[in-house]
Every structure is written in structure tokens, then in C-alpha cells.
Image (cartoon, coloured by chain):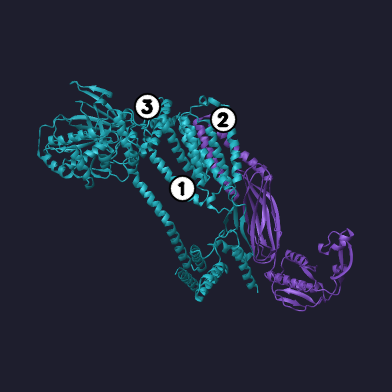
Amino acid sequence: MQKRNNKLVKKEYVRSLQSDPHPGFAGMRELKKREKDLEVRGVSEGDITGNGMPHKYIAVLLRGLLIFLGAYGTVWGLACSFDLAYEPVKVFTGILILSVFSASVYYNRATFYTGYVLMFLSFFFFSVVMYSYINSGFQAFVNELNEHYVDYFSLPALRVSDEIIADRSLTVPIACIFLGWVYCIMLNVTISSYMNPVLTFLITFLPLQAAFYIDIIPPYLCLSMLIMCYASVLVLSRAGNYALPYRYKKYESFARRRSHKGYEDSYILSARGMLSVFAVSVIFSLIFFVVSGAIFGETYSTRYVSNKLKNKTDDYVEIIVMNGITSIFNRYTATGGLAHGRLGGVGSVTPDYKTDLEVTYVPLSTDVIYLRAFVGNKYAVDRFMEDDSAEYEKISEPFVASTQPMEMHIDNIDADTEYFYLPYHSVNVTGDTAGGSDIIYYPETGNYTDEIDNKGMYDYSLYAFQNYVSIPESLIPVLDETVRKADMIGDDRTAAGMLYSCDKLRQYFEENYRYSLQPGMTPLGKDVIGYFLTSQDRGYCMHYASSATLLLRYIGIPARYCEGYVLKPSDLAQGEKISEDEDGRVTVKVELTDASAHAWVEVYLAGYGWTPYEMTPPSFGDDDEALPANGLMGILSGLFSSANRDEAGGADESGAGQSGVATGIFNRITDSLEYLIRPLGYSVVAVILLVLMVPFTKYLFSVAHTFMLKRRGHFSEALLVSYRSYTRKLYKKKLIGTVNADTTAVSEELAGILKGDEEKSMAESVALTVREAAFSGNEISKDEYDNSRMYMKKILKVITS
Amino acid sequence: MEHLKNIYYIITYIMMVAVVLLISVFYRQPLASVLLVFLVILPFISIAAGIYGSKRISITVSAPTEHVAEGDSFRLRIRIKNSSAIPLLRCTLRYKYYNRYRQDDKQYLLTLAGESFADNDLFASFNTSIPGMFVFESSELLISDPLHFHTFRKKCVISVTVPIMPVTVPVRDADYEQYEGEPFDDIISETGELTRDIRQLREYIPGDRLKDVHWKASASTGELMVKEYERSTSLMYLILPEITAKDEPEVLRMYYSLGKKMLADNKGFRTALYHTADRTFSFLSVSDAEELDRSMYEIMREDSSDRDVYGEFMIQNPGSFGIIRVCKSGIINS
């Protein structure tokens, strides 16, 4: 009697759920737990409902407002701090629209999926179309920032960035809107999704440190906006009633978490509460505005107190101001500027001008002296491997001594301690690499017209011609084309013939490439030398020396890539006179900074041995004295390298730097697209794959889940998972009214559709087994599970056919 | 748990203060110091707001007015009222609910938003599967200040009961014997069961049943008149429901069904109600559906017992006959 009544009650209960206006509120698992409660406790708790989500559009708009406060506050603060005229109305309106749009993406599921795609597509389109304007606006900001910092630190040099479009009334507002858009995207995550006050604070407040650092206070109103945003986010994050509407159904008011102790229901969204929190934060920020502005007013800068902590950081900031932000990563430090044959990964070179070596010697001529440290032989993609063959020794290399031996003393102050720094034709070295070293060497004369030969040199020549002419096969087309363009093949393999080739190559470099310490990084996956020869058209010593090494090898001249320091005549002028002997020969001490670090090619001249050859074209002082401040863009130049090249070329040719724009936006877009197309293509394919993977992943998860359940003997649970999929399929075929229909409803619906008695009994059997699995609390048997699965498949097959 | 959450919030807040402190030490600018002062004062303002707000927050729970039968779902209305201006005070109600016959210690938490100057209603739905007295109890309300530095505990004793009536089950159609034995004290004073014969009309006295009002006489006299019935001392059925542990639903269903059937047959009866706590009996007179429901409430308020209720009755009322026992074995007339 009791069992019968219990069944009756359960049936009523299931019916009551079915008649619930919000089916699907609770999943099958939840229903099962409730059923267990009913069985054991006689009562179970259903859903907690409120008024649903009233005024969720207010919640969304309020989020938009908070994002706007953060984004506009930061952009405004930065622009005003560095005196950039940014057209407040346009920027204000633009960022406001973008903020509200970003936040409204979370209104419901439809807006979420379409909104995000739309947002990123439009952002991408805007970035590409407005690239020149954004870039110029950014450069304008960098210039202003630089100017303020130069003033602050009283630095002599002014580093100027290339503003391709000089009209700041166009570029600055567009760059501000772009920056605002980036902020909208970021804040949409930190505020809308996570309501995280710490991240919001860090993202928006840290950039303003650029102004605070040099005692510039952004407008108080802008700071008040930020305070308003922080206060609201802080309180809302604590209260917790800021749920994203799209994650819940409109009638849901509470989120339930079930633990072993019981339920915990939380009210998920309170638009009214959010509004009142915002109102309080407005009052709070107004108080801040009044207190900070009224008390301290304009006197803030005079109240600045110098302190040791800040003064210490000033040294580093000064270097950044002088050499750009990438100097943090690329600055020559204790390594002495040697790259050990590495060619890739450096977008710009920024020496610190501190002494690395002290060289004491007797200068016999004003010739350049190369102090060789690293010698590279084999080349692999982005580096020369050090020549460490058994037959190779720097000192014992055969050469023709045409002068008297001389002495040189080198003190290693801050250079790489791995190497001795040896002039060519060194015959003896004593001391250690980390301290001082005494060297005996034969100075070069530079006279290569007379061929001199001997047995030792002949043997070494054979070795050199066998071992120092290898090139990677992948670069042959590039090298071949360059050799053809440079017209550098000499008539014979004599020293004169080799020098002819070197001269032609150097001439080719001078005519077609230019010296730059900021050539930009090589795009990922591209060969450094290949990219330099075909696309980059500018570089520093490393590029020229490495390219020349392979080009000379390609035409059969043994060549090696060398790194070390170069002692120039100009260094002598800065040198200190140590002594003077009877013959009037003066001993001088010269300090070499890391700016003297150098890379060059050495060629094996038949009859003379390894001889350094300067392939790097002169810089004409441009890069050394007024370095382009393309710090951030330097990082990005790998991606936008084509555009950079065009801009640089345009600037050189026209002087005003406007020729790039005059040729049309379309060309610029296509240039940008050339390098963006691959990452963009990959991204699109990845997104499509992800979208396609979702149902497949769900299916895989379902299969894996069922498999695990069966393996553990949980056939009831496994059947419920299968049944869930079964009802979904029926729902998709519009055979049942709701996807969460219970067994009674499904069997009743199917009874009207299925014609055969056998199928009807199958449907009934499935319903009975599922009910038993869900509500009895006992595990069903494997046979019951298998039979039900089979029946479900058969029923679906019959219905489909 | 709430305090653990607070620790997390306090740590993140301290980190924020530390950043501003660092900025203020680094720059030595008054603006950063103002911000720092604000951040230092803010926790105190928040706690003060929490104290103020917690005194002005109240929660009420209302039971449904309609009849709830076993298998039915019903909803309790929970109203949170924040009469302060402090926005979004996070309130957590600790509660438990149970059927008196299946009592346990499961605790539940309900987190609500105390919106300023607002009454918010929400509905907690419950499903039932057995009859009995449903109880919703809460003991305390946890209220956190806006920045969650401290959680205040407020006493919030709420107890709401909802009688879950049994469904009717088929009852054996039998000619039950009437009770014979010592008359009960309260029955003597009442002079027996009500009959359908009207003894007199009299003026209405508060406490009289509305169904006894003689509307026609009232209209003619201009005063509310009620009918007073003759009582019979000879006719009396006595039903003894024996609510033993684990069998409560069945006994309740049988008692309820038997009661309905007897009332349908125009047979009034008395119910002997066993008080588990002091092991005494009291007697309820049932002559209509309303009194039957009331007797159900009284029965369900009592705990079930492991004792021999019939034995106890016989000890206290020796020599009694014709008692209609409703127990797990069924309905027995002895």
C-alpha cells in the first residue's frame, strides 16, 4: 500500500514539474537529488524564485558606464597629461558607444555570440584601415612623452619618432579611440565578466604612472572618474549580485550550489542594487575630487619631495628615454655586446656607452684595428656556430708578417669574459680573459697587391677553401639573386679578384640598404639573412656581416662571421697618452664602450690569410644621434614590418614623410594584410575549428562519460545520460514539446506517433526503466541498460524512416 | 565560511592599500596620500555602515494559505526588508527545513541582496511526498558590511509550519462499534456528541462557529443568532490513531480517510490524541471537515512514539471497549 502510494506521489510530483512554467530549470541530476530527498526526508527543496531579472538592461548599461569611466578616464588622463589635443567630444562619444556596445554583448546569448564576433571583426577592420593614423597618433604620443621626459631629466638629445601623418588633429583622436577600444575590450573582461577591482585598478592606473613619474597630475575630474569606477567595482565584487544576464534564463533569480551539507542559493543580479552602489561611488568620488582638488589645488608639484627610491629608478628611466623601451631587453650590459653568433630576436640595439675594454697600445697608423672575439663558421637559420674545429686556432693561423711585432695590453672592464679580444695576426697572448691580457701581434698593412706564398699557407688555403664555403641550401635562391644584382663575381680567385667581389658587394649594400640600429625584428619563422636581403633593406653590422659571409661563400670565397670590438681612429682622440719612447712612438690607453662592439666578415685572401673586411655601410650619424623612438612599434615591427619599411622609405625620399599616405590607404592595407594574412588566416581557421569542435567535443564527452559510468557499474546514471541525448533528438525532430520532458510525457507523445505495438511497448519499457533508474535509488542491471539503449535506437530509427 | 571569504577580501584590500602606499611613498605626492587616507578610512566607514544596516534589515517568512496535500508543491514567501540607505548588503539566512517525522540537521544557506529602501519578495518552493508537519526554521542572519571586512550575526528566529495533509486511501466499509467506558471529564461538561436537533437559538458569543449562525433569525432580529444543538451522550465513536515511528504516513492516511468516511456517513467521533512528551491523552471532538483538519494538525504536531499507545490508553482507561484503533496493521475495532 505504501509503495503504491509513494509511486502515486512521485507521479504527481513529476507531473507537477512538467506543469512548472519553467521546465529545464533543474537538470536531470538535480531532479534525481530532489527525488532522493523526497524519498528520505519526505520533503525536498525546489527552486528559489524571485522576480527573475528585472531591468537587466540597467545592469548591462551600468557595466557599460563603468567600462566607460575606466577607459575614458585612462585615455583622457594620458592625453591631457602629455598635452595632446584629442578632441574630447569625438573621443568621449566614441568610447562611450564602444563601452556600452562591449557591455551589451552580455545581454543574452544571442547578443553574446553575435556581439563578440562583430566586436572583434570591427576592431580588426578599424585597426587595419586606420593603421597609419593609429601609428602616427601613437608616435605623436611617444614624441610628447619623450619631450616631457627629456625636459624632466634635462637631457640634451631629443629623439623624434616618424609621424607619417603629421596632422595631429586627425591622428590623435583616432589613436585615442583605438586605445579606448582596447581598454573597452580589456575592461569588459575585468568588469563585466569578473568584476575584479584589482585587475581593473592595475590596467587603468598603471599607464598613468607615466605622468605621475614626472610630476604631472592628470585632470582631477579624470581621476574622479577612475575612482568612481574602482569604488563601484570594489563594492559590487563584494556584494556578488552582478551576474551576467546571458548566463541565466530570464526567470532565474538565484544560483544554487549544492554541497554535502545542503544547498546554498545566492541572489544573482540586482540592477537596483548596482545602481545604488554606483550612486554611492559617485558621492565618494566627488568627495575625493573636492578634498584632493580643494586642499592641494595647483600646489601639488611644489610639494613633491625628492626621495632615494625614486632617484634610484631615475637612472633606469633615463636610459629608457634615451634608447627606447626595448633597451630594457636589448641593452648591452655586462656581456659586452657580443651576441655569440645569434642573429635573430633583436629588433634594435641600444648601447649603454659604458666602458667594456681598456686598450693600451702604440698606434702606428690610423687604420681600424679589429679585436676579434667570436668567429662563426656554420650557419643555421638564425645563428653562426662558433668555429671550434681542431685545426682552427686564432693565434696560429698562418699569415704574412709584413711589419714588426707590436705589443698590446687589454683590460677587460665589463666585456664578455669568455673570450680574449685579439687583434689580427696575434702570435702570443698571456693573461686571462676576465682580467688583463698582453698580446703580441703584427699590425696589418692593408697592402694586398703582392702575392706571397709559402707551404704553410698553401695547406691552410686548401683547408679554408674546403671548410669555409658552406651555405644553407634554402638560401641559395636569395643569395643567387643578390649576387646577380650586386654583380660581384670577380674574374679570378686571386686576392685582387676576391677584393673586387667584396668591394662590389659593399657598394651594393651602400646603394640599396641603410644603416639602422632599429631595423625591427625578423618575423617568426623567417630566416634572418634571407629576410634582410629580400625585405628589410636596413640593418646594423650584424646583418651586413652575416649576409656578406654567406654571399661571399656562395661565389666560392671562404668567409667567416666575426664579432668583437673595433678600435677606430676617432677613439684615439679620446685616448689617454701613457708614455712616449725615444723614437717618438706614443703609447695610448683607449677606452672602448659597448658602442664599439661590432660584427664583420673576414675573408680568406689567397696568400694573405684571414683578413677583416668592413661591409657595414656608414650610418651618417642619423641613428647614433637621433634614434627613432619606435620603442613599442619596434616590438610590433615584426608583424607590421612591411608597413614600416614603406614608411621609412617614404620618409627618406620625400622628406616630409607623407608619400606613404599619398599613395592611398588601399596600398597600405594590402601591405599590412600581406603580413597579417597568415596569422589572421590561422585565427579564422582556429575559430571555425573550435566552433565545429563544440558539438563534437560534447559528443565525445558524452561517450566518455557513459563509458566511465558503465565501467564503474553505474548503469542507472549511464542510462539517464543516454536518455537525455534521446529526448534531445526527439525534441529536435519536434516530436516532444520540451527538451526536458519527463518519461511520462515522452511515452505519451510517442504512443501517438508510433504505430506498431512492438515499438509502443519498447517506448513504454524505456520509460519504465528510466523511471526506475532515476527514482528507485537502485542500480539497474547491465541487461536493462543495454535493452533500453537498443530500444531507444530502434525507436529513433523507426521515427526517422 | 563567511569569515573565510572575508579574509580573502581583506587580503586583496590590503594588497590594494599596499600598492597605493607604495605609490605614495614613491612619489611623495599629496594626491596619492589623499587616496591612501581614503583607503585607510574606508574599512571603518564600511563596518559602520554594516552595523547601521544590519539593525535595519529584517526577514519575514510567510506560509501558504491554501491547503497542501502530500505530493503537492507549495511556496514560502521570504521577504527581505532593508530600511537603510546602505546599498546591496549581503545577507545570508541560515535555515533548515524538514518534515517533523523525518527530522535531520541539514543546514541551508540563502544569500540575499539587501537593496536599500526596498522590500524584496522571493519564493522558496518545496515538494512533498509524505504527510506531516513541514517546518521551516531559521536562527540567524549573517550580514556583511559593503566591503566584507566583517560579518555580523543577527538573531533571526523564524519558525513556520505548514501541515501537509495526507491523501485518502480506500477504507474498509465496516459497522464500527461505539465506545463504551468511563466518560471523559471534558465530555461530561460538554454533554456528549452534537446531534442535528436544534435545542435553541441564542445570541452570538465570540468563538462560535460561523456555520452555526442562523442567518434568517439574525436578519429578522437584527442581531447575530446562532443555533445550539442537542448533544447526545449515548452515541460516540472514539478513534485512537497510533502514530508509531516510520509508519506515520500510513496511519495518517488511514485516519484521515476513516474520518472523512465517517463524516460522510454523518457519524461524528472523538479522537484520542496521545501526547508523547507526558504520555497523556486528550480528546478532540470531530463533527465536520474543518474539525477533522484541525484534529490532523494536532496529531501532526505530536511526535511519533515507539510505545504501545493502545496499551497506554487501556492502562489509563481500564475496562474500555469499542475503541477504533488506527495503527500500522490497519483499522481495528476493539
Reading the image, the residue beneath label 3 is: A158
Which residue occupies the foreground of this view, A117 or B322? A117
Left or right: residue B72 compared with residue A365: right
Rendered colour, chain B: purple
Q: Which mark is residue A116?
A: 1
Rendered colour, chain A: cyan
Q: Which mark is residue A269?
A: none
Task: Identify which amino acid the numbered label 3 is placed on.
Answer: Leu
Task: Identify which amino acid the numbered label 2 is placed on.
Answer: Ser
Reading the image, the residue beneath label 2 is: A292
Chain letter of disc 1 in the image? A
Left or right: residue A99 compared with residue B2: left
Disc 1 to disc 2, C-alpha distance: 39 Å
Quarter of the image where one finds residue A477: top left
**Which quadrant would the C terminus of chain A be assigned to in this image?**
bottom left
Earlier in the chain: of badge 2 and badge 3, it is 3
Disc 2 to disc 3, C-alpha distance: 35 Å
Q: Position of residue A436 (x, y in %)?
A: 27, 32
Q: Are marks 1 and 3 on the same chain?
A: yes
Earlier in the chain: of badge 1 and badge 2, it is 1
